[in-house]
Amino acid sequence: MIRSIEHIWRWLAGIITVVFLVLFGFVLLPYASVVYEKAMLLSEQKEQISFMSNWQERLSNLEARQERLNTDIQSMVINLAGQEEFSKVVETFFKYSNTSVINIKRIQPVAESETEEFVTRQLRLELEGNYHGIARFVNKLEQGSYLVTTKAITLKAGSTTSSELLLGSLELEVTLMGDTK
């Protein structure tokens, strides 16, 4: 009788083990994988939502920067000289050359390009003066009230009587407002 009870308990333990393994293999593992997939999907969606909020924040920052740049460009465009003021720009060349103690020997137009809103004139100035005077002149031109860009500077030794004098060729680009039609 004890053997039959042991035998029954063994069968019962075996059946319970098989039922547990079947439940574990066919019910718990698939359910766990589904729960894991849903958790991964939920974390991806949360990450996407955080990216969306960051995206909106980045967009607002970029729009603010663009607005600041637009106002800066508008103020720069307002300060551009018109084509009719080109003689005033040339006058400033001579004014700056006098304060920088250099002589402008010649002003020669090189090229002119035109867009819808702007006219760009390239000029070549032939100068004579000392190194520091030419440097001051170029600095005043670039930081002056008109949009003047230095394209090239060529310096060479000047006359033999004065070793300090340099002859220089300066290529400039002057940007002016175009014709308003």
Image: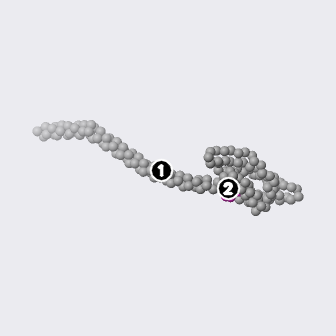
Query: Which residue has dot 1 on it?
Result: 59
Q: Is 114 situated left or right of 13 in this image?
A: right
Q: Residue furthest bottom?
A: 99
Most distant residue in the right direction? 161
Number of numbered tags placed on the structure image: 2
Q: Position of residue 33 (x, y in %)?
A: 32, 41
Give, as a three-letter code, the residue at label 2: Tyr
Q: Secondary structure at mark 1?
A: helix
What range is drawn magenta here?
141-146
Q: Going 72% across and 45% down the picture, which residue do you hit?
A: 111
Q: Kindly identify the amino acid type of the residue bearing the numbered disc 1.
A: Leu
In this rendering, would 141 be left or right of 60?
right
Q: Nearer the viewer, residue 13 or 49?
A: 49
Nearest to viewer (mark 1 / mark 2) = 2
The question of residue 68 being in magenta is answered with no
Q: Is residue 140 above or below residue 119?
A: below
Quadrant of the rendering where the N terminus is positioned: top left
**Is residue 107 in sight in this rendering?**
yes
Of callouts 1 and 2, the N-terminal one = 1
- Neighbours of disc 1 within 10 Å: few (<14), some (14-19), many (20+): few
Confirm whether the magenta stretch covers residue 142.
Answer: yes
Q: Which mark is residue 146?
A: 2
Q: Position of residue 49 (x, y in %)?
A: 40, 48
Q: Residue at x 38, y 48 (%)?
A: 46
Q: Which residue is pictured at 85% across the width and 58% down the height?
A: 163
Tell me where residue 43 appears, x and y as whole percent.
37, 47
Q: Secondary structure at mark 2?
A: loop
Distance, label 1 to label 2, CA atoms, is 34 Å
